[in-house]
Image (cartoon, rainbow, N blue to C red):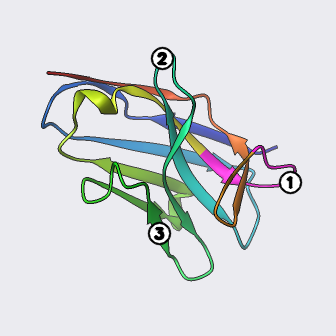
């Protein structure tokens, strides 16, 4: 059974930084995408960044490019999202996701079918 567990959320002031972590267990795909999405109150879920195993490539949404960085530690089965220069509009619940069967969301060629429970990030001005 695949489990994705996020941590690292919290409250920061504008300009601050946070690092989110996503611990994956039971995930045995050798070729995969893993990524981060977010959802603010009253808004649809949107993708933030993802990484794919083919050659370790990454992709970022325009609204976080240059401020956020996605990375992974394969030895720890953990995905990270380093968030710098946070702004109030970054306030949202952040979700970790991984590719799998019956994906519910597609970003490019990555279909995400496994989701974590989310971690809250609040940025105050």
Sort mark 3 into few (<14), some (14-19) or many (20+) by Cα contacts within 10 Å. Answer: some
Q: CA distance from mark 2 to mark 3?
A: 27 Å
Residue 61 position (above or below residue 125) = below
According to the picture, the residue beneath numbered tag 2 turns out to be 41
Left or right position of 1 against 118: right
| The label number, if any, that marks residue 77 in the structure image | none
**1 and 3 marks in contact (CB < 8 Å):** no
The answer to which of marks 2 and 3 sits earlier in the sequence is 2
Q: Tell me the residue at 52%/24% (across/down).
A: 43
The answer to which of marks 2 and 1 sits earlier in the sequence is 2
In the rendered image, residue 25, in percent from the top left (x then y), is placed at 68, 48
Between 83 and 6, the residue placed more toward the observer is 83
Q: Tell me the residue at 50%/75% (across/down).
A: 57
Q: Secondary structure at mark 1?
A: loop
The answer to which of marks 1 and 3 sits earlier in the sequence is 3
According to the picture, the residue beneath numbered tag 3 turns out to be 58
Specify the farthest residue to the right: 102
**2 and 3 marks in contact (CB < 8 Å):** no
Specify the farthest residue to the bottom: 55
Q: CA distance from mark 1 to mark 3?
A: 21 Å
Q: Secondary structure at mark 3?
A: strand
Residue 66 position (above or below residue 104) = below
Residue 12 position (above or below residue 95) = above
Q: Secondary structure at mark 2?
A: loop
Q: For the C terminus, which image quadrant?
A: top left
Q: CA distance from mark 2 to mark 1?
A: 28 Å
């Amino acid at each position: 059974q695949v489990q994705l567990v996020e941590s690292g959320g919290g409250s920061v002031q504008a300009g601050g930084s946070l690092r989110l972590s996503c611990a994956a267990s039971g995930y045995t795909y050798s070729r995969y995408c893993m990524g981060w999405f977010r959802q603010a109150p009253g808004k649809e879920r949107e993708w933030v960044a993802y990484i794919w195993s083919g050659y370790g490539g990454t992709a970022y949404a325009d609204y976080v490019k240059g401020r956020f960085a996605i990375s992974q530690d394969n030895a720890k089965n953990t995905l990270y999202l380093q968030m710098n220069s946070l702004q109030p509009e970054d306030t949202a619940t952040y979700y970790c996701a991984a590719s799998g069967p019956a994906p519910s969301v597609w970003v490019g060629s990555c279909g995400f079918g496994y989701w974590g429970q989310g971690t809250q990030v609040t940025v105050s001005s």
